[in-house]
């Protein structure tokens, strides 16, 4: 199974927060971990925000970056090919997604269409997870339920 991680799921591998254990379990079960190239910049931005909010976490910040850099080479990274970008535009319009969210979904759909294997989508953004499900992608069980419970 290929596990596609959007940035909200990828960050949970490096920052302990709600949903981290679920992502770690699914990563351990997956044969391949995939993400879009944009996830690197987005993850680094998330780490930088955490450092600004918690200035005492400088050492932890550096460790997160080092671990991401080590792991990055092992991930299947989907490039922003013209077909992916055009598909992202369509998906943004169809599902009301933000730009990078649409790129993540288009990247996962591209991977699925490349017959690389079964692709499961992981995102902790409710709108994106629902769009992935509506687009016919399996979404990590529990992600949509957990987000719906939190919204109540």
Image (cartoon, rainbow, N blue to C red):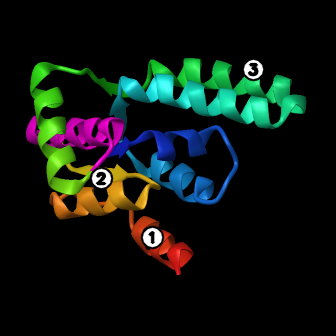
Instruction: Establish if 68 lies above or below 32.
Output: above
Instruction: Establish if 69 lies above or below 55.
Output: above
Query: Within 10 Å of the Cα at label 3, are there few (<14), some (14-19), or many (20+) other Cα atoms?
Result: some
Among the 4 quarters of the image, the one containing residue 104: top left
Q: Nearer the viewer, mark 3 or mark 2?
A: 3
88 sits to left or right of 48: left
At x 52% / y 52%, what residue is drawn? 23
Residue 152: horizontal and vertical position, in percent? 53, 81
Q: Which mark is residue 142?
A: 1
Q: Secondary structure at mark 2?
A: strand
Q: Which mark is residue 62?
A: 3
Residue 121: horizontal and vertical position, in percent? 32, 51
Q: Secondary structure at mark 1?
A: loop
| Disc 3/disc 2 C-alpha distance (Å) | 30 Å
Magenta region, residue range: 97-116
Q: Residue furthest right?
A: 56
At x 50% / y 72%, what residue is drawn? 146
Q: Secondary structure at mark 3?
A: helix
| Disc 1/disc 2 C-alpha distance (Å) | 13 Å
Q: Name the main secondary structure of what is drawn in magenta.
A: helix
Q: How many numbered circles does the render carry? A: 3
Is residue 110 visible to us here? Answer: no
């Amino acid at each position: 199974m290929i596990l596609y991680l959007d940035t909200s799921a990828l960050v949970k591998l490096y920052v302990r927060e709600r949903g981290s254990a679920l992502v770690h379990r699914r990563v351990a079960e997956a044969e391949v971990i995939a993400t879009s190239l944009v996830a690197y910049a987005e993850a680094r931005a998330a780490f930088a925000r955490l450092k600004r909010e918690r200035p005492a976490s400088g050492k932890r910040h550096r460790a997160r970056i080092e671990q991401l850099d080590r792991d990055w080479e092992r991930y299947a990274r989907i490039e922003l090919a013209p077909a992916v970008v055009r598909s992202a535009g369509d998906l943004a319009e169809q599902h009301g997604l933000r730009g990078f969210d649409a790129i993540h979904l288009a990247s996962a759909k591209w991977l699925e269409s490349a017959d690389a294997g079964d692709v499961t989508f992981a995102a902790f953004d409710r709108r994106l997870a629902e769009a992935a499900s509506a687009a016919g992608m399996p979404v990590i069980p529990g992600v949509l339920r957990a987000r719906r419970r939190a919204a109540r």
